[in-house]
């Protein structure tokens, strides 16, 4: 049998998103494990909440994933109605109702019916992020608040290099194109300003460094981005990545990953 070639798939491929990357929250949870070794420690949920006006009563969490932000808002803003939506049914399984499967570009909501929307680390998966921003503006009342987060093009460059080295020459592995570049922090303000006003960029540059003395979180992060057509190839990629990270730890005392993430908020025009 001809081996399946290793290939790069678009990070906006809906089948890949709903059946592999976000079939459930396991891969997202693997990536979150890096944050335990990241400094400074930042509470992104608390930072996002600071951008949400206290008087917001109807809040949409678009691309809510496993409800990371929804849970925090529901706990801290009991008077608000939080409506979480996600493209992937598997991600919503642990999210308490109300919740719904929906694409951010076609939300089942009336015009001007919500006070605030979140789009956290998700617009880079949407084929047309401008269409998503236009849809968020449609559902927001005039003066309503958009809060979004994404990563810069430089984010976790070390892990992209690690993956490239680990899969080099192997057959039977698929992985997404540079995940966040499709809607990167670097151009988010200009793209948001086409649809929204009063941009708040105070949390746009949240740089941090992850220092690992154990290869596992970096290797698990890499594995969480691979779609395995060939288990032996993935095992070989894991072996190589572990050896590379172990060698860096032995040489430098730690394996360091630089994180460049940010939050941006804005208002729907009146
Ligand atoms: C990186 S996760 C972020 C989850 C959550 N917002 C958070 O920050 O913890 C991206 C999520 O966006 C969802 N997603 C991707 N494309 C979407 C779309 N077009 N409409 C709605 N959700 C989408 C994925 O299924 C996934 O759950």
Image (cartoon, rainbow, N blue to C red):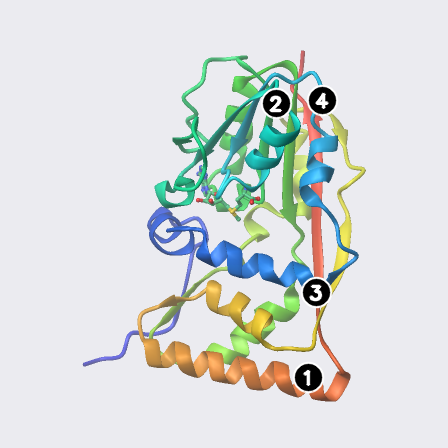
Q: N-terminal of the two: label 1 or label 4?
A: 4
| Residue 7 placement: quadrant | bottom left
| Residues tagged 2 and 3 counted as in contact (Cβ below 8 A) | no
Q: Which residue is mark 3?
A: 37
Q: Which residue is mark 2?
A: 78
Between residue 117 and residue 5, name the one nearer to us. Answer: 117
Where residue 154 appears, x then y in whole percent? 68, 60
Q: Which residue is mark 1?
A: 248
Where residue 39 appears, x then y in whole percent? 77, 60
Where residue 256 appears, x then y in whole percent? 72, 72
Q: Describe the element under mark 2 as helix, strand or loop.
A: loop
Which residue is painted at 77% across and 31% down in the image? 200
Disc 1 residue crowd, few under 14, some 14–19, many 20+, Cα 10 Å = some
Q: N-terminal of the two: label 2 or label 3?
A: 3
| Residues tagged 2 and 1 counted as in contact (Cβ below 8 A) | no
Q: N-terminal of the two: label 1 or label 3?
A: 3
Where residue 104 appears, x then y in whole percent? 46, 32
Is residue 102 rendered to the left or right of residue 256? left
Looking at the picture, does residue 238 appear above or below residue 226?
Answer: below
């Amino acid at each position: 049998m001809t081996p399946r070639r290793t290939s790069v798939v678009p990070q906006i491929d809906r089948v890949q998103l709903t059946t592999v990357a976000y079939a459930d929250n396991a891969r997202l949870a693997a990536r979150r494990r890096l944050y335990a070794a990241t400094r400074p420690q930042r509470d992104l949920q608390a930072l996002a909440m600071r951008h949400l006006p206290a008087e917001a009563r109807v809040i949409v969490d678009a691309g809510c994933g496993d409800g990371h932000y929804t849970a925090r808002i529901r706990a801290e803003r009991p008077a608000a109605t939080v409506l979480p939506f996600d493209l992937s049914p598997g991600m919503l399984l642990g999210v308490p109702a109300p919740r719904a499967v929906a694409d951010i570009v076609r939300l089942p909501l009336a015009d001007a019916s919500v006070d605030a929307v979140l789009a956290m680390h998700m617009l880079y998966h949407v084929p047309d992020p401008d269409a998503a921003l236009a849809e968020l503006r449609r559902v927001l009342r005039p003066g309503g608040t958009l809060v979004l987060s994404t990563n810069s093009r430089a984010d976790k460059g070390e892990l992209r290099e690690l993956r490239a080295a680990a899969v080099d020459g192997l057959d039977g592995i698929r992985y997404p194109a540079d995940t966040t570049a499709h809607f990167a922090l670097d151009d988010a303000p200009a793209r948001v300003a086409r649809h929204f006003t009063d941009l708040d960029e105070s949390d746009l540059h949240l740089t941090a460094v992850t220092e690992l003395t154990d290869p596992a979180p970096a290797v698990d992060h890499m594995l969480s981005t691979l779609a395995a057509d060939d288990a032996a190839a993935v095992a070989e990629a894991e072996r190589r990545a572990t050896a590379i990270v172990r060698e860096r730890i032995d040489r430098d005392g730690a394996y360091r990953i630089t994180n460049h993430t940010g939050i941006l908020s804005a208002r729907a025009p009146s």
